[in-house]
Amino acid sequence: MVLEPWEQKAQTVRDYRDASLAKVDPPLGPIPNPLPLNSLDLPRQLLTAREYELTQNYDAIALLRMLRAKEVSSEELTRAFLRRAAIAQYAVNCVTELMWDEAIERAKYLDSLADPLGPLHGLPISIKEHQGMKGKKVNASYVSWIDHNSEDGLLNDTLYNAGCVFYVRTTGPQLMMHLECSSNIYGRTVNPHNRNLTCGGSSGGEGALVAMRGSVLGVGGDIGGSVRGPASNNGVYGFKPTCPRISTKGKKIGMAGSEAILSTYGPLCSSRETINLFMKVALDCEPWRIDPTLTPIPWSPVTLAKPLKIAIEWDDGVVKPHPPVIRALREVAEVCRKAGMEVIDWVPLDHSKAWDIISALYFVDGGENALAPVIEAGEPILPLTKFIIHEQPTVKSHTIAEFWKLCVERDAYREAYAKHWTATAASSTGEVDLILCPAVPGCAPPHETARYWGYTAQWNLLNYPGVVFPVTTVDQAVDLREESYQPRNDKDRYNYDLYPGPERYEGAPVSLQLVGRRFCDEKVMAGLEAIEKAMGRE
Amino acid sequence: MVLEPWEQKAQTVRDYRDASLAKVDPPLGPIPNPLPLNSLDLPRQLLTAREYELTQNYDAIALLRMLRAKEVSSEELTRAFLRRAAIAQYAVNCVTELMWDEAIERAKYLDSLADPLGPLHGLPISIKEHQGMKGKKVNASYVSWIDHNSEDGLLNDTLYNAGCVFYVRTTGPQLMMHLECSSNIYGRTVNPHNRNLTCGGSSGGEGALVAMRGSVLGVGGDIGGSVRGPASNNGVYGFKPTCPRISTKGKKIGMAGSEAILSTYGPLCSSRETINLFMKVALDCEPWRIDPTLTPIPWSPVTLAKPLKIAIEWDDGVVKPHPPVIRALREVAEVCRKAGMEVIDWVPLDHSKAWDIISALYFVDGGENALAPVIEAGEPILPLTKFIIHEQPTVKSHTIAEFWKLCVERDAYREAYAKHWTATAASSTGEVDLILCPAVPGCAPPHETARYWGYTAQWNLLNYPGVVFPVTTVDQAVDLREESYQPRNDKDRYNYDLYPGPERYEGAPVSLQLVGRRFCDEKVMAGLEAIEKAMGRE
């Protein structure tokens, strides 16, 4: 078979990846073939007991404590995560490069120091490929860009200066604009809990890797749900801060200079406190002195003065979430009430319009510039790319004046939503603190079906911070299809039809999202702490 | 003579203005004809001794103290400022509307209250016409818009809720994009110190009115120097905060939705502390909860921990300032040194490029949308409009992709400048705190010659806060033309030729600008306090 030129190019990148994985030492034992539906037990089968313990049992906070106490060396820890990340790659295809030699060299260097370099001293951290890496190539899933050199990234520099070890880079989808994770270079990343389901995207590689515990802290990006979707689908923690707090300087994108909707980086990780640590490290260095796009607000944790007033968004009025998500909302609402919080219903304000605005603003040039490298390479335009560009009636090429008009619409909507939220203060119990809502309208959906962005993109349009946290898993006995439901519109019907019953979602995690007002990031995190404590967690 | 339709329309607006001025009671005595070169003594001739005292001798802070102590009623004060504003109008043509009845009614209401309404209780405040006013028309100097109704303005609401009295609205130029103040509706506003010179623009009406002490606190707008230029030309205080801190919600512009370069409102006033008061009032109400474009940073005055390190920008490398400005820089540098501050030279970083970027971004549609209402009305396109649109080689119609590219250039320049400033920290005495520089490359220039925006627009591009303060006046004996100077380029030659000698600038104030890093607004104000104290001021 003769490969197309773009296929040959893509193959070179996979060869590079495979060579990086071949460094694993000692090599992994045989990988099951065929792979199981659920990949989560593979690491136990393939790692040493010590490797398994180190990677399985601790979050970043605990590992950093152990590193400081010299209960583990950075080298030992890094080797364990390198091997576990390799397993994750064989299981779910989430890795673009394993940095074996460099990571071990870095870890040894850190181990050799008398004093910790910084708050992340010795901790292995994973990074989404499209965010770049000093001295590396960065293709952002474009075949055309496979020879492009990475720029320096301010956030990477910050993490590095804080003492972390970069050891693995992870997959993203074509254009970085799917809520799944499939590209012509790396193929499809699947969900570790159930390989028939998507890991989500665009930071799907990170989501899957963290779920596999091939990483305790990874960095993804979010402009419509790209951190929160994968976090939800994979049952891990994910945070999208208010923009612009975290620098995305150095990222590789097809529409540099587009700023009507801001993207941000955010952590995917195995515990809530890891998010707080990440944010603190990212902001303590005053990145706004280097990157003038950033708002100079330090990370300032808050203490809640009184019990939370939480509004539950059961349904955004456009697409009704699947039964497991509604159950999760009900369960969390119940424990919050029992813990003394006030729980009311959120009234969504025309979320359909929000999608019209943000989907238009994503590709205000009609998608031309984002697609140009795809077309240049001759690689196929993938179905979810067509979905987000060609199948959105709002996406078209705008003149400058039309573009301004859209920005005015965006601002009017944002203002109306702020008023809507402030209006809750008229109640005798005061203003709503946080909104508890779905992150996606179900569990991880089957491949190629993640076509509803509303539950995450809503908060990108409004620039509200949102954290996703795992709540439960699909219950085969309880999460039955609502047979009598009459869908309200095509999107709702599409989503409804995705849920013939719980059996399709075997093993799938169910997650929720907690959202705060613009720049209330610290309050969102304090609220999550209160909620998780109410749930009986630490 | 038959008037063109646009002229007839413009006449109706002037008739409206004149009718509003006819309310002045008691009427003013005869206005000198011809008017003197310098208008500043007219109020003394035309006001009662008490009116003159109230308007001449106190800043907003002192007046508020007197209002609180009931040494003066809001009504008495408002009447005095109404009459003085009317004199200013006859002298320099800075008023679009005198709000006689409404202002007195409001003042009476405030006087009737047992307790002050807020921190501005009873204080008359002037507002630039294009910023709108509840229940009024707003034309923004477009003939086409003379029947347009004003939207509510968030800042106006804030000031009003703090207890102020709105009593007069002031002129701006065509498009609000001249550093002078001339329109087909209101004609030309001239400089109170010397009517052959411009009052500056776009907030030229405010600058002239405050110089005439027809107002102690007015609100203007700034996207390229429109607060700071008039402040400098008229010898009053003017402040452009970092964007977006002050809401411009409600302003009337021809390019709504354009946000690559942000505009802001800012105060023009008769004392430094009035700026601090204005900022505190504007931000204490948390306007970011209403206007989601704003950064949620409260006004947080700072105390300087050590003597300032000030860098003097003697010359931006493009256009050399006129002798009075260089002298003012020298004099202030000297008193700062004597007060124990460190004074070094600022090295400008390619300010010519900054102008190329910002001038392109002002009118990224080639000016089409800003000019459309002018063309629609058939009113003449004024020379300084042609200058800023048609005579700038950078101004053209951009595609979305070209526009993005410009934004990338802007961000790269901002980043380079941040690095440039941070690099000063390598010195043994640490980082430069503030830059002292010209606000305009001379005193107020003759009409139609304000064609160099570099000394103000530079800081708009960088989004650095800047305050303008009066330093001295032109000295006929000292400020001689530098005969041997060889201009470096056409802009430099044009500016050089504007200064045949000090005689052209008789009576003109000489002002300077103090600039800080992005969001260091409070530090700029603390720095100005230190400098003014070094100058022997309060």
Image: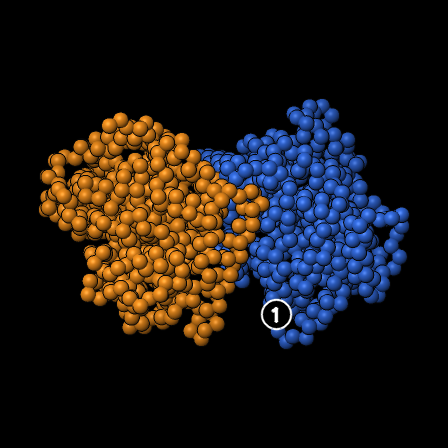
Chain colours: A orange, B blue
Q: Looking at the picture, tell me which residue is in the foreground, B390 or A479.
A: A479
Of B175 and A399, the residue lying toward us: A399
Residue highlighted by disc 1: B117
State the image coordinates of residue B463 (x, y, percent, origin top left): 54, 44
Picture coordinates of residue A424, whole percent (x, y): 46, 69
Q: Residue at x 47, y 57 (%)?
A: A353
Q: Can residue B96 be seen in this snapshot? A: yes
Q: Is residue A139 above or below residue A58?
A: above
> Where the N terminus of chain A falls, by quadrant?
top left
**Dot 1, crowdedness within 10 Å: few (<14), some or many (≥20)?**
some
Is residue B332 something one can see in this rendering? Answer: no
Give the image location of residue A140, x and y in percent. 35, 37
At 85% across and 56% down in the image, what residue appears? B45
Q: Which x, y percent locates residue B408?
A: 49, 37
* Residue B157 occupies quadrant: bottom right
- At horizontal 75% and vertical 55% (from top left) the residue drawn is B96
Q: Closest to the observer: B530 or B286?
A: B286
Which sits in the foreground, B478 or B450?
B450
Q: How many marks?
A: 1
| Left or right placement of residue A414 versus residue A310 in this view | right
SS under mark 1:
loop
Q: Is residue B515 above or below residue A23?
A: below
Q: Is residue B450 left or right of residue A296?
A: right
Residue at (68, 59) in percent of width and height: B149
Quadrant in the picture for the C terminus of chain A:
bottom left
* Image position of B292 with respect to A144: above or below: below
Protein chain holding label 1 = B
The three-letter amino acid code for the residue at tag 1 is Leu
